[in-house]
Image (cartoon, rainbow, N blue to C red):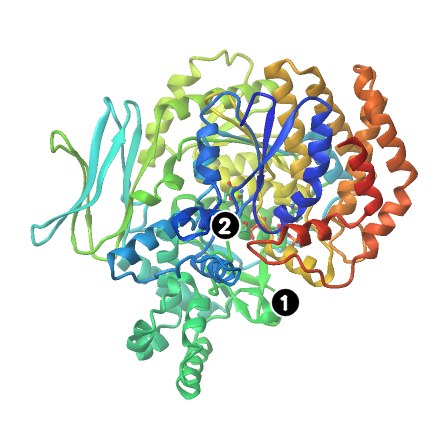
Amino acid sequence: MSSDQTIIYTLTDEAPLLATHAFLPVVTTFAKAAGITVESSDISVAARILGAFPERLKPEQRVPDALSELGKLTLTPQANIIKLPNISASVSQLETAIEELQAKGYDIPNYPAAPKTDEEKEIKARYGKCIGSAVNPVLREGNSDRRAPRAVKEYARKNPHSMGEWSAASRTHVSHMTEGDFYHGEKSMTLEAARDVKMELITKSGETVVLKQKVSLLQGEIIDSMFMSREALLDFYEKQIEDAKKTGVMFSLHVKATMMKVSHPIVFGHCVRMFYKEAFEKHGALLDSLGVNVNNGMADLYNKIADLPVSQRDEIIRDIHACQENRPALAMVDSAKGITNFHSPNDVIVDASMPAMIRAGGKMYGADGRLKEVKAVIPESTFARIYQEILNFCKWHGAFDPKTMGTVPNVGLMAQQAEEYGSHDKTFEIPEDGVANITDLATGEVLLSQNVEQGDIWRMCQVKDAPIRDWVKLAVTRARNSGMPAVFWLDPYRPHENELIKKVRTYLKEHDTSGLDIQIMSQVRAMRYTLERLIRGLDTISVTGNILRDYLTDLFPILELGTSAKMLSVVPLMAGGGMYETGAGGSAPKHVQQLVEENHLRWDSLGEFLALAVSFEDLGIKTGNAKAKILAATLDDATGMLLDNRKSPSPKTGELDNRGSQFYLSMYWAQELARQTDDAELAAHFAPLARSLADNEAKIVAELLAVQGKPVDVGGYYKLDEAKVSAAMRPSATFNNAIATLA
Ligand SMILES: NC(=O)C1=CN([C@@H]2O[C@H](COP(=O)(O)OP(=O)(O)OC[C@H]3O[C@@H](n4cnc5c(N)ncnc54)[C@H](OP(=O)(O)O)[C@@H]3O)[C@@H](O)[C@H]2O)C=CC1
Ligand SMILES: O=C(O)CCC(=O)C(=O)O
Ligand SMILES: [Mg+2]
């Protein structure tokens, strides 16, 4: 039961989940001293899968639907949730997770990729809720405030990460569509009154196909109708592939198939099929009969042809290789293993992949393991332009300098599934040529209409009025509190953003903006303006819609701090509670691999430390718990010491890792608590722990380092064995005993 003295700590996947196994016992122990209970909530992909099939599991195997429960909690004022990054699963990740769970004795069904019976359709629908970005949209009942805390920024200035060189002659560039994409035909409107609408297709033959029965819209809500023409997309790909071949640059494709889980796998699949066109033409019938769907990447093809007779399989592989001969070189995800950009739609996630490329001097890895110039294909032009702008800037100015550059925090419109990131249940691949209408259910009035062709991707996006109003307020608050100028990245030529601009202007009037510098600029101008300030060491808040929130909160942190893991990421929930996300990055799958093979976890939990401090502070302020405020202030000081003393995890096996870093944080935190004079009881409570950790520092670090360098078993990938993972993540008996004395 959640009370106002409860903090919910999510259990997620991969590296963050491993780190939580080490950190949670510490957090629980420290929080208890302030009368705060820390409860965990398992929202991992494995738990979400098991939660979808309770009737097939034995009673002792069943798990609660933790995600729905948390979703409900976000609508209450006492919500205080620490949310770690979780896997937004691709179909192939889902299938691997299912296999692992089945092998562990859970009687869950296989994933029916092409369902035929009603039962299979039902199973696919249930699994549909587990794939893609299934967690964040449920919990994000507030807008987003992401920034680099001062201590973190200072640390990056003093300890700059490496940056690749930029050349003015670099041929790296962004290619996006110039017609026929979501941007070009977009239509948008603001509703004067609440309405229920449906999404329907009137086919050329006059038939009506209802694609979405009902969407209830509120007064003041903005809705958009937009589509991507398949023909224009294929034409675009063909030209880009040819262009890269002719000009000798490497080809790469950047999408966000996790969050855009319906549209982007389709966009991705078309590119793969175009790239390997001759092979797909020749073997199309066979590949179809095997159920190959390269919307899930070439990995799907390789898996499905694995059981073919050798000669048949070899012929397909030969033909695929033959295509490669006539195609441009492909950017690699893992050149050592021969994994290309086309392996899985989730391997190259645009928000992280483009910044990594920019940080590397505009280069990505080729098949020979060397960095090369690249054509970055980002079909949807709406936001692709910002990347070309920053590439141009780097070619002209050279690489950014982390020692001197300013910072770009973000205030993002995110609440209640805002904009494109909430559109997957209203996104359709058009089955037949016709007219796609958003129609009022009661009156039959057609609100927005588009001419579409078979294979086009049509979607409706929504953003409600209350989140927009809250977002404007958050922007003004951040501008006031930070003293930084704030720029709304909004393009009046884009119908949706033009509607937003009207609301922004209205809601800005509700606030005292005297002395504040608040401007509205189209994305490209906003990028240029921000970058010109950035290199002069000046800070600028970006105030953006949902997609740019995601893109910019990886882009700037990766350039400024080397990773988005070090960001403070707060979601002030609209109902009054708070969610504290840790960093802005993902779950770094290769970190798990290193742990399993070498028992070294390079994951940096800094994001957790920052989030936890704000969570304690918020609880303290809202409930008058003075001890919670002291926990917050001392944790921040401890985090500062951790940075100053360089006790962050090293990527190298044999050096301090996540566990060692957490030990130091615990020691500094206990010392700060023992030293503070605001609460004598807390000081006395923590003094013995502070002493024993300091006395045993060398012994504990030695125990933590001793386990490294050999494989370790955590009992699974998606579903870990609690005893094994706990043993692996807490290998220092001395440290565990010290914590236990307070528990
Ligand atoms: N909020 C959320 O829940 C999010 C979830 N995701 C999910 O995460 C997965 C991976 O996504 P991807 O786009 O590759 O992004 P990641 O952020 O996981 O990875 C990019 C790189 O950033 C570095 N990195 C990120 N976090 C940390 C950290 N805490 N400590 C140290 N290094 C870190 C790692 O670099 P190096 O290897 O050099 O150490 C990593 O390889 C996907 O399943 C995706 O769906 C993605 C974004 C947000
Ligand atoms: O939910 C996801 O898939 C990723 C979220 C993300 O990248 C972000 O919010 O920065
Ligand atoms: Mg992101």
Q: Position of residue 669 (x, y in %)?
A: 79, 31
Q: On the rendered image, what quadrant is the C terminus found in?
A: top right
Circle 1 crowding by C-alpha within 10 Å: few under 14, some 14–19, many from 20: few
Dots 1 and 2: beta carbons under 8 Å?
A: no
Q: Residue at 49% across / 61% down in the picture? A: 96
Query: In the image, what residue type sits under mark 2?
Result: Gln
1 horizontally vs 303: left or right: right
The answer to whether any part of residue 150 appears in the image is yes
What kind of element bears circle 2? helix
Kindly identify which residue carries mark 1.
370
The answer to which of 227 and 163 lies nearer the viewer is 227
- Label for residue 89? none
Q: Residue at 34% across / 55% down in the picture? A: 124
Kindly identify which residue carries mark 2.
61
Query: In the image, what residue type sits under mark 1?
Result: Arg
Q: Position of residue 100 (x, y in %)?
A: 52, 61
Q: Position of residue 439 (x, y in %)?
A: 17, 36
Q: Is mark 1 within 8 Å of ligand 1?
A: no
The answer to which of 669 and 322 lies nearer the viewer is 669
251 horizontally vs 613: left or right: left
Which of pointers 1 and 2 lies earlier in the amino acid sequence?
2
Which mark lies nearer to you, 1 or 2?
2
Q: Residue furthest left?
A: 206
Q: Position of residue 33 (x, y in %)?
A: 73, 24
Q: Residue at 46% across / 57% down in the picture? A: 94
Q: Is mark 2 within 8 Å of ligand 1?
A: no
